[in-house]
Amino acid sequence: MNPYILATLLFGLGLGTTITFASSHWLLAWMGLEMNTLAIIPIMAHLHHPRAVEATTKYFLTQATAAAMLLFASTTNAWLTGQWDIQQMTHPLPVTMITLALALKIGLAPVHSWLPEVLQGLDLTTGLILSTWQKLAPFALLLQIYPANSTLLIILGLLSTLVGGWGGLNQTQLRKILAYSSIAHLGWMILILQFSPSLTLLALLTYLVMTFSTFLVFKLNKSTNINTLAISWAKMPALTSLTPLILLSLGGLPPLTGFMPKWLILQELTKQELPTTATLAALTALISLYFYLRLSYAMTLTMSPNNLAGVTPWRLPSAQLTLPLAVTTTMTLALLPLTPAITATLTL
């Protein structure tokens, strides 16, 4: 893609998200989301591969549906209450509709089916943008409307953690596994949204860091399925020994960074007298942990079935930047001791 066109599209992507962040009026927020969607579509389809085009079409249709639903709900809210303000959502009907529209936008269960399919059709860089940056604008709106419909949010959260764990169990494609991982993490964030928005923000930030490092590892190894992970030891031995730790951090295992949001969320749910919800969420985290362990096993404890000539790939110097990977990997592995400082900063 022409660098000028790419720069324009990335600028549009950033501008759309910023407009949604800064808006207090529903029409402006909707406009930001639309700009965001329209800017990423050419980036998704730039490979001109049938799968990429199919993924782009699916993405466009789901995002357009969610945007139309959002616009309809905000118009309904204006008709019922006379308010276009995002923070003045008092009527339960538009609040529920907007919550479901934003759930469709970010890919929460039970409206998640598009996410694994779309992510599978994209390259890892675009998949990274879709899994991280594209979640920010809808989350900003969810945090602003502060939906008081507790039952709906808890159902969405628990379903997402369950589907995210269950769906990833049988996958061999890494992008689909990362899509289900994304659904499970979003479920944890939604679960705690109404009780502690600062914890949702913390979970979102740790998710962004961990997902960033995982995608960068796979991109550096050029891995798209589990089998290609098995030969990564020959390409990058040091990184291969660190990757299982990154994956286990995504699974939420102590003493890694990923344990921090899960631990605090379970603690908060127990404080809110929701022990059953906390127990179910913890059990679904175990299901997710299984497929991260499976990836770790495939990467470090197995060898790809090759003939002798094909065992060691060429170790050519990579042209990719490794600084972002180094920074995010360090954050993925070592932020747990800073938990008190991070929580204090977020609650200011």
Image (cartoon, helix red, strand yellow):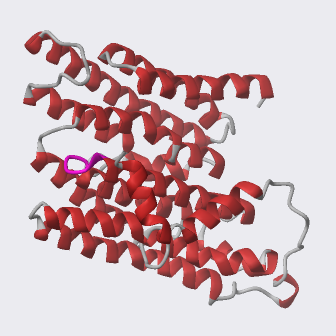
Quarter the N terminus occupies: top right
- Range of residues picked out in magenta: 193-197
Residue drawn at point x = 26 percent, y = 25 percent = 69
For the residue pair 311 and 334, the one nearer the viewer reads as: 334
Q: Residue at x 12, y 47 (%)?
A: 150
Question: Residue 275 placed where, x, y %?
Answer: 12, 70
The chief SS type of the magenta part is loop
**Place of residue 129 in the rendered image (x, y in percent of width and height, measured from the top left):** 57, 43
- In the picture provided, is 208 more to the left or to the right than 283? right
For residue 227, side relative to residue 83 (left or right) = right
Residue 246 lies within the magenta run: no
Q: Is residue 196 magenta?
A: yes
Q: Residue at x 49, y 66 (%)?
A: 338
- Asked if residue 284 is positioned above or below residue 3 in the image, the reply reads below
- x and y percent of residue 61 in the render? 40, 31
Residue 239 in sight here = yes
Where is 78 relative to 168, above or below? above
Asked whether 315 or 272 is in front, the reply is: 272
> In the image, what residue occupies the spot 37% across and 35% down?
140
Q: Is residue 174 left or right of residue 185?
A: right
Query: Picture coordinates of residue 312 (x, y %)?
Result: 84, 82
